[in-house]
Image (cartoon, grey):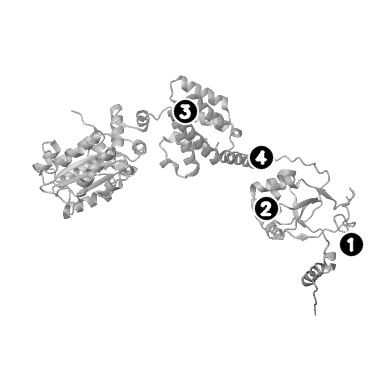
Amino acid sequence: MYQVLYRKYRPRVFSDVVGQEHITETLSKEIETGKLSHAYLFTGSRGTGKTTCAKILSKAVNCQNPVNGNPCNECEICKGLDSGAILDVVEIDAASNNGVENIRDIREEINFTPASCKYRVYIIDEVHMLSIGAFNALLKTLEEPPAHVKFILATTEVHKLPVTIVSRCQRFDFRRVSPEAMKDRMEYIAEREDLILDEDAVSLISRISDGGMRDALSLLDQCIGHDRHVTSEIVCRVAGMTGKDHLFSLASTVSNKNSAEALSLISDLHASSCDMERLCSDMTNHFRNLMIVKTVKDSGSFLVCTKDELTQYKQQSETFTLETILQCISLLQECMANIKRGVNRRTEMEMTFIKLCTPTLNDDSEALLRRISELEIAIKTGAIKAVSEAPVQTSAPEDKPEITEAQIEEKSYREPQPTYEQAPEAANEEKAPQMPSEESSDEEQSIPWAEVLSELQKINAPLWGVLMDSQAVIRGDFVLIKSDNPTLNSFIRQPGCARNVKDSILRVTGKDYRLGIHNSQPAEKAAEAPKKDPLQNLISRARDMGVNVDVK
């Protein structure tokens, strides 16, 4: 009778186990030195050798002639355990024997000594399926079993085990088998089975199996059913990897922002009995592949695809920005969650692709980043140009030296006729502002400063707080800021802060102005203004209140 490959070539000694040397060497040393634990816990993903190592360990501890910690597979005990004639090694499936009564049966059986072997070994597979009551019933027995009893627990989901169970066992974590180790093992089997394996086919099987040796051998078994010369095309056909054209087509509708074509494709797929949940999962994986191609230099080792498909991924990734790909993955994951909640699957997919094809419908941060990134690329490539709403200057502007953002100078702009100057102190009243004539080259114009501050608040809140009570005017190609806040100078001299102010002005006015500090009082008058002694001010206030102050 034909026996499948993963059963026919199941390892019989520790040295045959692929990719788990950190575990097999430890177990071999323990058996060789006789320092055995009473309970073992094997964890790891499917097909990595947990049950296989448990069976080898159960034979090795009972073998009459162990060889370097491995069972000899020649003595009566090893042959009896292989054939099932000896019942001292019990394998229990916890998925179907997960009740308290099953654990009670074990507690009663362990009181009897083994019939033929040195140890009675209990292998409990998928132990995480036991009920809470069964775990509680197992605790005391697992902690202090009789000297002739060994427990080996195996699970793929160790996080579901109570910590009280884990702490009573010697834990071994099984890793996913590397593609190189899988390749060596499959080439060894192909040589024994007289098969022809193409190198591309072996690499593809290794990536599809995702670190599971059993899955790799099962897929190889299916390929042999087609042809004993296994090629990458046969592997693709057997694994169901063909027919990805609709995924590339749907992704193209997103890059072209063609929602009508996307809905038409979804309608055709729905009419062909395509499951929308599976389609959503495939599209998520498709954009994940585009993300890998976009970010990883050697992306072929990360993707499960043929060389032709890898070329298609590279070409299509050029039509997307990384921000767009990340937003697509996020929206598709939300779609998957909504589908699982039982909403209309087709409608949910259609809504998702309309959002993907129409970025303006989304107002979340990922959608905004995507739109900004697309605008930046369009401006760099010249696809669009920035349009200014400010009036076009017919005459060439005067060539003035640019004030750098890091070195904004404090300037006092004096007018031939005082405009925002105060009258002499003798008048003791403020002059009304005088608007300069249009012929003046240094005339001051108003600017919608409140709108500028509103834009600034969105990008730099601390600087907005400094400028909150300020005013500003336009003089030539300068925007002059008037503020009594003493911290303005230190803030505005920072390159980043100055850039934020200029960007906010550009968004409101459409023109890139230079910045300056407006001094409302000329430097000469400021120097002439007498400085009052604070003590004299205090004495004057006291005398005004009727207090007789005698200063000597």
Q: Secondary structure at mark 4?
A: loop
What's the residue type where badge 3 is placed? Asp
Instruction: Name the amino acid type tagged 4.
Output: Gly
Mark 3 to mark 4 CA distance (whole Å)? 32 Å
For marks 3 and 2, the one nearer the N-term is 3
Quadrant assignment, res 310: top left
x and y, in percent, of residue 91 in the image? 19, 38
Residue tagged 2:
465
Q: Earlier in the sequence, mark 1 or mark 2?
A: 1
Find residue 378 and name its label.
none
Instruction: Residue under label 3, please give it.
Output: 245
Q: Quadrant of the C terminus?
A: bottom right
| SS assignment at label 3 | helix
Q: Is residue 486 above or below residue 96?
A: below
Tell me the mark number nearer the camera, choosing from 4 and 1. Answer: 1
Q: Residue 165: image x %, image y %?
A: 27, 46
> What residue does disc 1 label?
424
Q: Where does the N terminus fall, quadrant-wise?
A: top left
Front residue of 543/552: it is: 543
Q: Residues within 10 Å of mark 1 (few under 14, many from 20)?
A: few
Question: Does the image show residue 260?
Answer: yes
**First in sequence: mark 3 or mark 1?**
3
What residue sits 43% from the left and 21% below the top? 273
